[in-house]
Image (tube, rainbow, N blue to C red):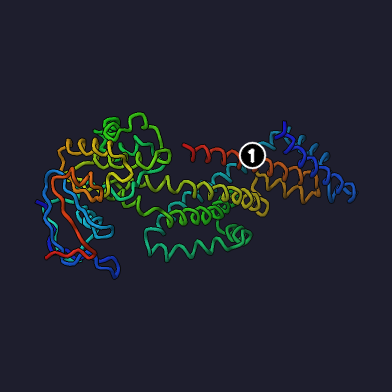
Amino acid sequence: MKKLLKTAIPLGFWLAVWQAASWAVGRELLLPGPVRVGERLLALAGTADFWLDLGATLGRVFLGLLWGALAGTVLAFLTHFSPWADRLVSPAIRVVRATPVVSFILLVYLWVARAAIPWVIAGLMVLPVVWGALSAGLGSMDGKLLELARAYRFSRLKTLRLVYLPALRPHLSAGLLTAFGLAWKSGVAAEVICPPARAIGSRIQQAKLGLETADLFAWTLAIVALSLALEGLLRWGLERGDRR
Amino acid sequence: MIKLTDLTLRYGDKLVLDRFSLEIPDRGLTALSGPSGCGKTTLLRVMAGLAKPESGTVSGIDPARTALLFQEDRLLPWRTAAQNITDVLPRSRRGEGPRWLAFAELDGEGEAYPTALSGGMARRLALARCAALGGDLLLLDEPFAGVDRSRTARLLDRLRGLGVPAVLATHQPQVLAACDTIISLDGPPLYRV
């Protein structure tokens, strides 16, 4: 009960602030109130299109997360063990990390099919984060355990499985949690700028063009709720894995 | 006989072995004794093939057939006590976990993680893991640090019962007394031409 109140009171407070601001502005076109947005969200959630759009965006974000995380992991090992790969690849990854996502979206728009842009962009945002987290982890590996693996004649695969991966797990977990938020935001941003046929971003774009501000808020609310729920799920899964 | 001949080794600018030669029996328990930092650990590491001397030769042992107990326990913190032992065993010997836990008097602690073990228990586990790995020669660096006297005596008996020659770097009078050969060292650097 106490826990519920701790969540409900701040939520109620901010909903009240939102409603008061909406009344103060007095124009639904500029700032619809939470009740109106809630009504629109419920109405949208009653349609099959809402769930299909949601699923399509989710699929792209996860695809981006997957390829970005895999590429980031492979490159982290490569740049850690090969000085030449480090000299060649690390600066490029740092450039990717520093480049604004909008620049990437517009560039990638020229090179790949529209439907692929969101997951390509999401992966590009994930890759440097996972690479950075794992590179830091590899840099701080316990040399004494690695020497033990050598002295006790562990094969490379066994050293990877028993020494590297468990030691890197906290770094990978932290990197994935940060990367997930980025994948979600950049993926939806790419959908808004280069709208595919079926996507949350496309619906946001339509709502903006049609000046349907309540719909814009409703879709944004859906994204936030889904992102928080999935991040919580990911955190739970990673913590559960860390405890084992 | 294990022969170390004319070994020279430095750590940075520090000369640790200066044309050092030594013969070590390849049977029974041999103790290397000497003050802290005199080079005992370095000698064990050279015999295990982990430290490469600038010059000199080591004969009478195959480093790939030695098992080194490091000065620190170096247990894998994310593996249980039993897994720490079975991880070093080939697939065909995985069932030996309980035997080696019993060797270290850690029966019932197989599911415990190293962080839950006391210092002495962790040391015994590391010793059991080294003994389980086995080979032609055990190289044991302070094997009984933090282990009580009565357990040390029992572990020494079990160690002898394995029938594998062992070289022990130690300060403990109780351990020195139980060894067949005692080699006193004085350094650094160690030199004996």
Q: Quadrant of the C terminus of chain B?
A: bottom left
Residue drawn 24% across the image and 35% down it: B154
Residue farthest left in this picture = B1
Q: Chain letter of disc 1?
A: A
Where residue B43 sits in the image (x, y, percent)?
Answer: 21, 57
Residue bearing the label numbered 1: A229
Residue drawn 24% across the image and 40% down it: B131
Alpha-carbon neighbours of circle 1 within 10 Å: few (<14), some, or many (≥20)? few
Residue drawn 50% across the image and 61% down it: A93
> Could you tell whether A98 is left or right of A135 in the image?
right
Mark 1 residue element: helix
Residue drawn 58% across the image and 52% down it: A117
Where residue A25 sits in the image (x, y, percent)?
Answer: 89, 51
Q: Nearer the viewer, residue B23 or B175?
A: B175
Q: Nearer the viewer, residue B155 or A84?
A: B155
> Could you tell whether A161 is left or right of A58 in the image?
left
Given the image, on which type of amino acid does mark 1 rest? Ala
Where residue B170 sits in the image (x, y, percent)?
Answer: 24, 50
Where residue A216 sits in the image (x, y, percent)?
Answer: 76, 46
Q: State which quadrant residue A2 falls in.
A: top right
